[in-house]
Amino acid sequence: MTRPSSAENIKSVIKLPISLVIITFNEEAHIERCIRSAPFADEVIVVDSFSSDCTVELAKKCGALVFQEKWRGFGPQKAFAASLAKNSWIISLDADEAFSPELGAEIQNSYATLSSEMGYYFPRKSFHLGRWIGYGGWYPDYQLRFFNKMISQWNSEVLHEKVEVKKIGYFKNPILHWVFDDLSDQVITNDRYSTLGAQKLTDSGKSFSYVKFFTKPISKFIECYFFKRGFLDGMPGFIIAVGASYSIFLRFAKHWEIENVKNK
């Protein structure tokens, strides 16, 4: 599949005391685009979980400082990566994300007015199944990724991690997200995340619920496809809604499996 290109150059780039921080594992298909989309950042930190592909070499080629660290879970890994940065201002991106040129310019123009007590949200626009997805809960999909580490930091959640901040602000323009390589990658990702979600339910002491098992997958499809107008994205919107429903189904099915099979 031919991917749309993201901005690699922003005219009149001003280097700012901002550290772009990225965690990686086998991201050779994405890492260069991610790093090169942020020429305004005067430092790039990559924390890699011992990739077996060319991620590390490509990141170093783009000027990043690369550290190898065993996987700790999303929150702890991102917090560790931020701790390595020389700058107080941190922008945390996933390797399959990149700045739109408009967002890069907006960050440069807004830097002087930033408040250290605030964490800043970026809207996120995702590309999947040959198009940019505009509905189904996928856009604007705000993500808090810009913060001052002297005041704010990632929490310790291994899944659904977030930055804990005192105040919040918003940027107008989006980061771009190449969310899945293809449908097979979507299935693999849903399988991985549902396992983490099921284990989190177990660790929190929650018992398996037959009511949620039967109703949550159905309500998730209705939410994504009808209430959040996923149907406006055509066939990709339908596939996304079914995938979201199936991911919820897997989470509860695996929760049942842990309680009734693995722990017996």
Image (spheres, grey):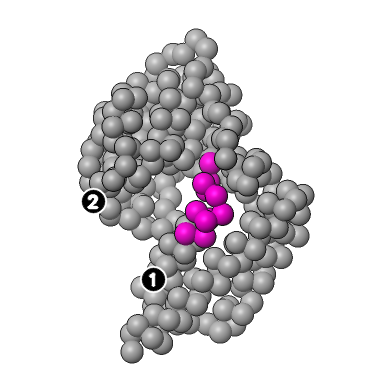
Q: Which amino acid, mark 1?
A: Gln
Question: Vertically, is 151 above or below 104?
Answer: below
Q: Is residue 54 left or right of residue 248?
A: left
* Residue 4 magenta: no
- Residue 35 lies, with reference to residue 245, above or below; the image says above
Q: Which mark is residue 62?
A: none
Residue type beneath disc 2: Lys
The residue indicated by pointer 1 is 199
For the point 68% across and 51% down, the residue is 236
Which mark is in front, 2 or 1? 2
The span shown in magenta is 178-188
Instruction: Answer whether residue 262 is visible to the viewer in this image.
Output: yes
The quarter of the picture where the C terminus appears is: bottom left
* Residue count near mark 2 (Cα–Cα under 10 Å), binned few <14, some 14–19, many ≥20: few
Residue that appears at 26% across and 34% down: 66
Label 2, label 1: how far apart the Cα atoms are: 20 Å
Q: Which residue is mark 2?
A: 70
Residue extending farthest to the top is: 12
Q: Position of residue 120 (x, y in %)?
A: 49, 36
> Among all residues in the image, which is located at the extreme front?
1
Q: Is residue 184 above or below residue 113?
A: below
